Image: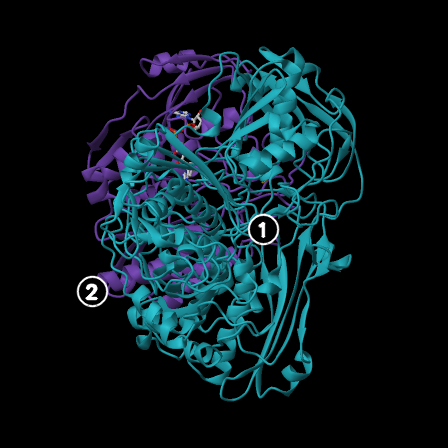
Chain colours: A cyan, B purple
Amino acid sequence: MSDAHDAKLVEEGAALARRPGRTTTPVPAVPENWAGVAHADPLSRGHRGYVGTPLARLDGPVKVRGRAPFAAEYGYDDLAYAALAYSTIPKGRMTGLDTAAAEASPGVVLVLTHRNAPRLNPQPGYDMSLRDPGIGFERLPVMQDDRVHWNGQPIALVLAETQEQADHAASLIHATYAAEPAVTSFAAALAAGTRPLEIFGRRIRVELGDAEQALAASAVSVDETYRTPPHHHNTIEPHAVTVAWHGDELRVHDSTQGVLHTAWTLGQILGIDPARIRVTSPFVGGGFGVKVLWQHHVLAAVASRTAGRPVRLALSREGVFRMTGGRPPAEQRVAVGADEDGRIRAIVHTGAYATTRHSPWPEPLSMASQNHYASDAFVLDTSMAYADLVQNCSMRTPGSTIGFFALESAVDELAGKLGMDPIELRLRNETATNPIGGKPFSSRHAAEAWRAGAERFGWSRRSPVPGSVRDGEWLAGMGCAMVSHHYQRRPGGAARIRLTADGRARAEVAAHEMGMGTATVQSQILADRLGLDIDRVSVGYGDSAMPGRFLAVGSSQSAGIGGALLAATRNLMDELLKLVRDGSPLAGLTLAEVGAVNGGLAALDDPSRHESYESVLARAGRAELVVEGSGEPPAEMANVSMFSFGAIFCEVRVSSVTGETRVSRILGSIDCGRVLNPRTAASQFRGGIVMGLGAALTEETVFDDRNGRIVNASLGDYHVPAHLDVPPIDLIWTDIPDPYAPAGARGIGELSSTGVAPAVANAIHNATGRRIRDLPITPEKLL
Amino acid sequence: MIPFTYARAGDEEDAVRLAGTAGSTYLGGGTNLVDLLRRTVERPSALVDVTGLSSSIEDSGGGLMIGAAARNTAVAEHRLVRTRYPVLSRAILAGASGQIRNMATVGGNLLQRTRCPYFYDVAGYRCNKRNPGEGCDAVGGPHRGHAILGASPACIAVHPSDMCVALAALDADVHLRGAGGSRLVPLTGLHRLPGTHPEIETVLAPGELITGVQLPAPVTGERSAYRKVRDRASYAFALVSVAALLGVQDGVVTSARLALGGVAPKPWRAYTAERSLIGGPATATAFRAAAEAELAAATPLRDNGFKVELAVRTITAVLDGLVREERA
Ligand SMILES: Cc1cc2nc3c(=O)[nH]c(=O)nc-3n(C[C@H](O)[C@H](O)[C@H](O)COP(=O)(O)OP(=O)(O)OC[C@H]3O[C@@H](n4cnc5c(N)ncnc54)[C@H](O)[C@@H]3O)c2cc1C
Ligand code: SF4
């Protein structure tokens, strides 16, 4: 395809009208083997319809009415309530586990411990090869022996008639231990030695040229160490399951990012056919990576089977801290060398983080530096240090949230040393191809995002001299940083569409709505692909009995569902044409010759040849037509490098008296392909920015280095940003469709949190002249 | 479950009578006590609800009498409080959240317990306040938020209240009523330092009830301020807070009342600093010297040393701000 053609499409896309309403020109089916072909999807070609309009969330009304059922709200007549008791040492054996008082406590139905738990298979964990739909981070056996692996491990489950009775009885359980030496601090873990991080058996180390030598030879360079603490996700809804056995079928009401995966994984552990487990999760009160299978799923299922009663196990906030981990502590070295004119010659990004020996889980810090700056030489590597702490896991933008803190702080430091504007430095190192591997980017408009953001934010008013803007005791400054995240479409996506004689279509995908707007946006896409009014389509999700293997992770769902839906709509149109009878205006047309419009199909070259879905089905005497479609293997990433980009700009005020930082303004300028729905997209960006502010200024899971126990296991003590900490957040986007992504959209969930912490740290430097390289930037660091 | 009885007191006499049996505890808004019950830190056998007792806020001879059952929000919003004692209003509004302040009572705020996380983690840690004599796990653990003044090796917890800091500076008195009758103690004398008995936090006798707080008439010519330094902009306890009332004439400090929060096991009246201030010049240098004199007694630990400098700076800035305000 010619450059001019591309440019025209880009222009068209950028100029997309935000006019709500359904498609008025026929939308053809996406051809087979689209993945890897530029602009194969008509929705990525300047199409107008519902896509791109700010439709309000379809799940809004049920949520504000309190009618959206969450996992801990499903009732069963005979429901029993569970509570957990947790270990208080980091490592060793239980020499005694006194459950007598708990068993004698009023209302107690069952006390489950390793002594009476049925034999179970170990947790399979997540399958990096993606062959099996395993989910969960930990690979330990669940309550199978007297071993303690971390401080906070569940050691007993109590089942009782009421939650209060269960909670109380759990507090009566008393364990004695034979403690063993444990590694309970990151420092001790590092001191014991690190090992290289491998993902799917391969080291993630990237080496290009001789970076250390290029660094030494650079005219200007920075070489610094950055430290970040552990974090917890703190979803507003704590983890919960309600489970019930019906014979040997298990029903699980869950709060999860992977319904099918949870069913499969539970099946492996319980030793039953996953097809006999149905997991539903219609509403999830936040996931961010942590709503996967943890021990509570297994314990609830086992307790329910043992007691012969439906069981609810809702973790307390403390329970969430004790038994589900988050982002691990990390220490990173970033060195960047450049010519005097700012051309980057070398990037060294190495780092280590803490994980468990039994279930090492990747936090690929150094990957943040992999795809952005046009450097000649790179050394990028991440290593692991083993600690006896609660299992670390993925947290919104694994590797990158803290990896970007290190990289983008270092780039800002480099700009300072060069005496160059930090945006100018970034623009000078823009690249059209991925510096590692050399593939062209599918669509990279980072420079536009930088320029538009700088303009809108008023960057030109920034004083380049740190510490020079003062308002009474308050020092003001501006900072910026890049955000980026890779596009991802995971294999295994599939969808079913049911078209009924009344001309309505319902799609079903085993995907997840965690508040992102998934169902709303996919309804918009479905309406456009089928030429239907939005109120004639619906999207079902959150049920392991539905088709497709989806995980709501890695900002991959929109693309994954998109890829499945476009296949299913193609199949639907194909099947409809087979039903077309002589006399129909569509008679004789092939799939390539029709498009969907006005509640039916029409000839692409003559839209007046149109027949409605109702009519096609009625003539064929069909009450409904049900088709399925599977997403093609994700070949679109084969020849192009697919990333979202953008920049965060922020303004801070720092008290020269107390060291308190207040962020007064923040702007995200985003290049994420097509924005499918500005309203839900803005909400995703805002949420990511707020989480980024927490990482920058207030959040830290405080572990007690003496025993590996979390000290601030509550929302009172763990400081997520409060409303007053969140300034007005302004957002703009390029809205240029990605020619290779379904509907032109690259996925956005994890993008915006990546650059916030460095933007804040850089702004603090601009305000005060103080460079803080360890998070969170609490007042004492600025005294 | 740990059973307890619940009774609602009709009047003060009733309350004291109901609380006469061992194991009973008064219940205010419950914003602290209910959490402590849930965590089994406190295990009373009887709760005596005192939210039905006096909640009036009334002038008393130019001062103010506040009933112990008055809600924190009601006090903060009251016209007489805002006009005569703005420092009290500001201190209350700097604390907790709107919802909690709507529930919390004055009596409960005075007697709220420390937020030391080890105190709350019954399963995981030793705490002398919970189990006298067993040891204090805060001393060797992360203790960034703990006390730098008035603590002892037995306990380094801080008193968390904002309201009490303002009351301490305002020379408030606390009305008490017990089986043996009524008495008045100065707020600064209500809480005890931990010494070797951190489990004994106040001078209250068992069953003694707080009935009200009395504020003396404001000192004419004093300006006041409350400043709270914290980890996030709202809904966090103080790292350091300062309540200050300052009178200045012709560049000389004529009166100074200063109290600190977030640094000590009780609302900390900074007498040493006050002595250093009164009669001296109203300059930033003198303010800093006074603050340093107060903090000379500090005994910081591994993680909380920053509070010393933070307190000195905050005191200096607050006093300096009052002088500038005066000039403006
Ligand atoms: C999340 C959170 C954040 C908070 N943040 C802050 C903050 O930033 N600043 C701050 O100052 N406070 C803060 N608080 C604490 C709050 O101010 C207190 O919980 C509240 O003031 C307690 O009042 P209450 O009436 O609810 O007391 P209760 O919980 O009912 O009682 C507390 C104690 O006082 C005793 N008591 C109550 N009334 C009487 C009486 N009349 N006579 C004798 N004894 C009595 C009770 O027996 C109990 O021991 C916070 C609380 C929470 C939960
Ligand atoms: S500081 Fe005081 S309250 Fe905290 S653990 Fe030690 S004794 Fe208990």
Q: Closer to the camera: disc 1 or disc 2? A: 1
Q: Residue at x 46, y 52 (%)?
A: A559
Mark 1 belongs to which amino acid? Arg
Q: Is residue B71 above or below residue A332?
A: above
Give the residue number, with chain letter if any, for mark 2.
B328
Q: CA distance from mark 1 to mark 2?
A: 50 Å
Q: Which subunit holds the residue at mark 2?
A: B
Residue B117, by quadrant, is top right
Do the residues at pointers 1 and 2 share their chain? no
Q: Residue at x 49, y 55 (%)?
A: A695
Give the residue number, with chain letter if any, for mark 1.
A327
User: Which quarter of the figure is the C terminus of chain B placed in?
Assistant: bottom left
Near mark 1 (Cα within 10 A), the count class, few <14, some 14-19 or many ≥20, is many
Q: Which subunit holds the residue at mark 1?
A: A
Residue A752, by quadrant, is bottom left
Residue B70: x percent and y percent? Answer: 29, 29
- Whether residue A419 sits left or right of residue B225 in the image: it is right
- Where disc 1 sits, the SS reads loop
Residue B277 shows in the view: no
Residue A588: x percent and y percent? Answer: 35, 48
Residue A270: x percent and y percent? Answer: 69, 27
Mark 2 belongs to which amino acid? Ala
Ligand 1 image-quadrant field: top left
User: Which quarter of the figure is the N terminus of chain B placed in?
Assistant: top right
